[in-house]
Image: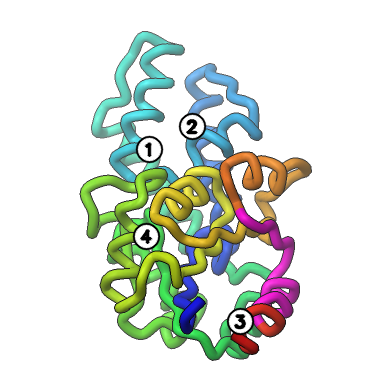
Amino acid sequence: MAEPLLIFDCDGVLIDSEVIYLDVELTFLRDLGISVDWATYVREFMALGPAEWRIKYAGLILRETGEPLLDAGFEKLKAESRRRVAEGMKPVEGAQAMLERLTQKRCVASSTQLAFLHRKLDLVDFSRFFSNGVFSGDMVEHGKPAPDLFLHAAQAMGHENSDCIVIEDSANGVRGGKAAGHFVIGFTGGSHCRKGHGDMLEEAGADLVIESHDALSGWISAELRAA
């Protein structure tokens, strides 16, 4: 492999915010009388591109209640998610130390809309690690699990697809990274990762599953710095 490009997902990999999104979205469903198993929701809904997520989420509500998710309901949900995330976000354990040690070229590729993605990175002081390498689902036609965002990030950063390593905590992200032709590491260090999360990522196609940023740093040191 040539000098690799590391492509990090944001929520649940760098920032421990995925657990907040999941709580808000599942609570919204419960308030409508809809019960969804945590593992099923994580596997099918987590990290979808915004348009893809809204279609799938609204479809679930329509099937279960017979009522559509109107714009007002969607905006209420979105506002609550953003409020909770902005108030409660913190880095995933070990993420800052890992980024400070990192020497390889890196970027972020997240389903989050670009303005809020920059705000999240600013709030945890991670923007300094990525310069102009911040890519959002806003930038492509199809969000995760399509490969579009990963392909866009690789091209913009000047790397071949075979020279990219994706670090993802979601099945949808893993699928997108593999569809783009990248090596994909499934990451299970976020607080939303329950028993079986690594198995789910392996089933989605992850080449490797790593449980912490300390372990990720060790893998990078052993596998990449000697390359």
As measured in the structure, the alpha-carbon distance from the residue carrying label 4 to the one carrying label 3 is 20 Å
Q: Is residue 146 above or below residue 151?
A: above
Point out the stretch of residues depicted in magenta. Answer: 207-220
Nearer mark to the viewer, of 2 and 3: 3
Residue 80, horizontal then vertical, whole percent: 43, 47
> Residue 53 has which mark?
1
Q: Is mark 4 on a helix, strand or loop?
A: helix
Please, what is the three-letter code of the amino acid marked with disc 2?
Phe
Q: Earlier in the sequence, mark 4 or mark 1?
A: 1
As measured in the structure, the alpha-carbon distance from the residue carrying label 2 to the one carrying label 3 is 43 Å
> Residue 224 has which mark?
3
Q: Mark 4 = which residue? A: 150
Q: Which residue is drawn at 45% across and 12% down?
A: 64
Nearer mark to the viewer, of 4 and 2: 4
Q: Mark 2 = which residue? A: 28
Please, what is the three-letter code of the amino acid marked with disc 3?
Leu
> Residue 172 has which mark?
none
Residue 125, horizontal then vertical, whole percent: 48, 82
Q: Is residue 221 above or below residue 119?
A: below
